[in-house]
Image (cartoon, rainbow, N blue to C red):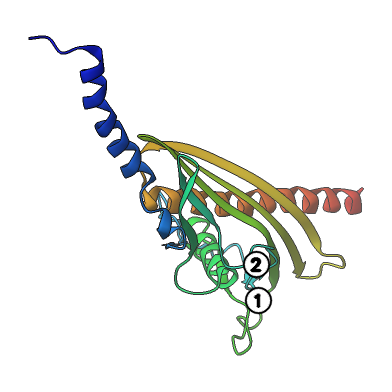
Amino acid sequence: MKRCGGERLALWIPAALGLVGSLLGGCSGADRVIPLEIRALPPAVQAAPSERDTLGFAVAPLRDARPEGSRLGSHTQLWVTKAYFNIEGGEIGDIAAQVFIDHLKHEKGWRAWLAKPGVAPPEGRPYVTLTGSLLECAVEVRGWLAITTMTVRTKLAFELSGAGREKPIDLTVKGEKSEWTFGFDRHGVETLLNKALLESLQEFLADARMKELNRQAREGA
């Protein structure tokens, strides 16, 4: 015997409500926090230390000037906030500085160390000091049924000084990276955040190099 349309609808409604309930479930867990790990991405080929490049980098912890405090952003599912993100293992400014140091050492093959009280630079060798402020670092993860979009926005103010420079090189760089995946992947969010921070550093170093070359060209003219 065939079921009528009303009977079929009566069967589908509980199933549909169950699906929506599972997707929107956990509304009471809106205060749940997901820690994210910021780390240096492993280089494809680790650079060997260059003895010819005698310039070193003293990298100071970044000043956290974000208005939102410890939170980095949120994970929402169909407009409902499921959780918030924060940084695992300490202050974001300290951790970001260590990520930059690891990148400079292992990816570039340059000398780099953390500039803080009690840490003396190598004697007899010139170095520059890299300081900066984290003005924005926002992670936004949105789930739409099976699809999840991940967006990271960064804004960092860098300054490079020392090594005989009369005037520091300063620059503010902004970046945004987005990807999508099936379901929620915390490690995917971490990788996107790490990429955004390192690309900001790379952009600053490239621009600082161009400014330095332009200065040398003007002085040699």
Q: Can you say whether 94 is above or below 205 in the image? A: below
Q: x, y percentage for residue 25?
A: 35, 49
Residue found 75% across the figure and 47% down from its top = 210
Residue 110 in view here: no
Q: x, y percentage for residue 72?
A: 55, 59
Q: CA distance from mark 2 to mark 1?
A: 7 Å
Under circle 1, the secondary element is loop
88 vs 73, left or right, is left
Residue type, label 1: Arg
Mark 2 and mark 1 lie on one chain; the one further toward the N terminus is 2
**Is disc 2 in contact with disc 1, using a CB cutoff of under 8 Å?**
yes
Residue found 20% across the figure and 12% down from its top = 4
Residue found farthest to the top: 2
Residue found 64% across the figure and 45% down from its top = 175
121 vs 216, left or right, is left
146 vs 129, left or right, is left
Under circle 2, the secondary element is loop
Residue type, label 2: Leu
Residue 86 in view here: yes
Task: Kindly identify which residue carries mark 1.
Answer: 125
Residue found 57% across the figure and 54% down from its top = 197
Task: Kindly identify which residue carries mark 2.
Answer: 55
Q: Which mark is residue 40?
A: none
Q: x, y percentage for residue 62?
A: 65, 69
